[in-house]
Image (cartoon, grey):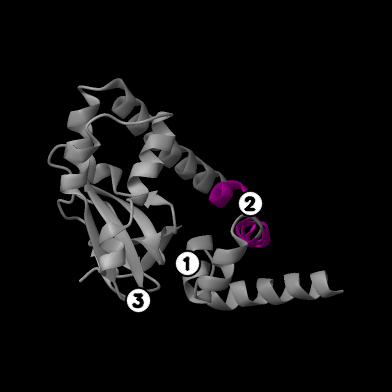
């Protein structure tokens, strides 16, 4: 159950959506009614892969991983989401869509869950909501493009250094085995790169 502080806290989603829109959003109270605050222990599942789940999330606290599960059971980590960031399966937001990946908490985490159908309905009536959803879709598309470019054009060490430089605080919080999966490396291979980079920095 969320604490009284969590219940009374202004939604992070409101600030994020208003920033994306460039100003106040009309009829926020409609979204407020659909917003749920959910708490997960480390290892808890936010949502599964290949299920109907038309929701978007904003992280209040904690850290989650977004990952694909292959037919052989292997996990491929596409990205991480931490405080103040948002996520959702774009495939599941389409009519009759289903999630293309799953989300798991790496730390005790509190997230805000918003029904995307409510947001889409408001976007048909109000330009600020349309701007907000467009801006957030662009953020997701840019993330995907950047991720694809890194995997296709950068070597293993460059991928690690790029992540370390972009997210120094996350590099310390993410288990090395999960970071390895995200970077397309084996844990042993990433460990060698980490040691090599540290030695070079210290030398």
Q: In this view, does 128 lie above or below 30?
A: above
Q: Of label 2 and label 3, which has the lower sequence position?
A: 3
Q: In which quarter of the image is residue 165?
A: bottom right
Q: Residue at x 67, y 60 (%)?
A: 161
Identify which residue, 28 or 191, lies in the foreground: 28
The span from disc 2 to disc 3 (Cα, nearest Å) is: 31 Å
x, y percentage for residue 143? 48, 44
Residue at image x 40%, y 64%?
61
Where is residue 137 drawn, in percent x and y? Answer: 37, 35
Q: In which quarter of the image is residue 64?
A: bottom left
SS class of the residue under badge 2?
Answer: loop
Question: Visible in this render: residue 84?
Answer: yes
Q: Distance between the residues labelled 1 and 3?
A: 18 Å
Q: Would residue 203 be counted in the magenta stretch? A: no
Q: Which of marks 2 and 3 is in front?
A: 3
The quarter of the image holding the N terminus is bottom left
User: Marks 2 and 1: in contact by CB < 8 Å?
Assistant: no
Q: Residue 150 carries which label?
A: none
Does the CB distance between marks 1 and 3 fall below 8 Å? no
Q: Whole-Å distance between the Cαs marked 1 and 2?
A: 15 Å
Q: Main secondary structure of the magenta part?
A: helix
Q: Is mark 1 on a helix, strand or loop?
A: helix
Q: Give how far across and how far down residue 117 sits, in percent.
A: 17, 38
Q: Which mark is residue 181?
A: 1
Are there few (<14), some (14-19), or many (20+) residues within 10 Å of tag 1?
some
| Magenta-colored span | 150-164
Question: Residue at horizontal 62%, vertical 77%?
Answer: 191
Q: In this view, does 96 lie to the left or right of 91?
A: left
Residue matched to label 2: 154
Q: Earlier in the sequence, mark 1 or mark 2?
A: 2
Q: Residue 42 carries which label?
A: 3
Q: Which corner quadrant holds the C terminus?
A: bottom right
């Amino acid at each position: 159950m969320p604490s009284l502080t969590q219940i009374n806290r202004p939604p992070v989603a409101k600030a994020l959506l208003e920033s994306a829109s460039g100003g106040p959003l009309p009829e926020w109270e409609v979204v407020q009614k659909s917003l749920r605050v959910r708490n997960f222990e480390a290892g808890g599942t936010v949502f599964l892969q290949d299920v109907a789940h038309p929701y978007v999330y904003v992280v209040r606290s904690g850290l989650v991983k977004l990952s694909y599960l292959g037919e052989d059971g292997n996990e491929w980590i596409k990205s991480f989401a931490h405080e103040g960031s948002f996520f959702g399966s774009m495939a599941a937001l389409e009519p009759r869509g289903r999630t293309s990946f799953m989300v798991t908490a790496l730390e005790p985490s509190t997230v805000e869950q918003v029904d995307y159908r409510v947001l889409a309905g408001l976007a048909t009536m109000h330009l600020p909501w349309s701007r907000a959803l467009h801006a957030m879709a662009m953020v997701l598309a840019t993330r995907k493009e950047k991720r694809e470019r890194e995997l296709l054009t950068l070597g293993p060490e460059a991928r690690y250094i790029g992540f370390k430089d972009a997210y120094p605080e996350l590099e310390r919080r993410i288990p090395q085995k999960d970071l390895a999966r995200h970077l397309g490396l084996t844990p042993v291979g990433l460990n060698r790169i980490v040691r090599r980079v540290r030695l070079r920095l210290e030398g």
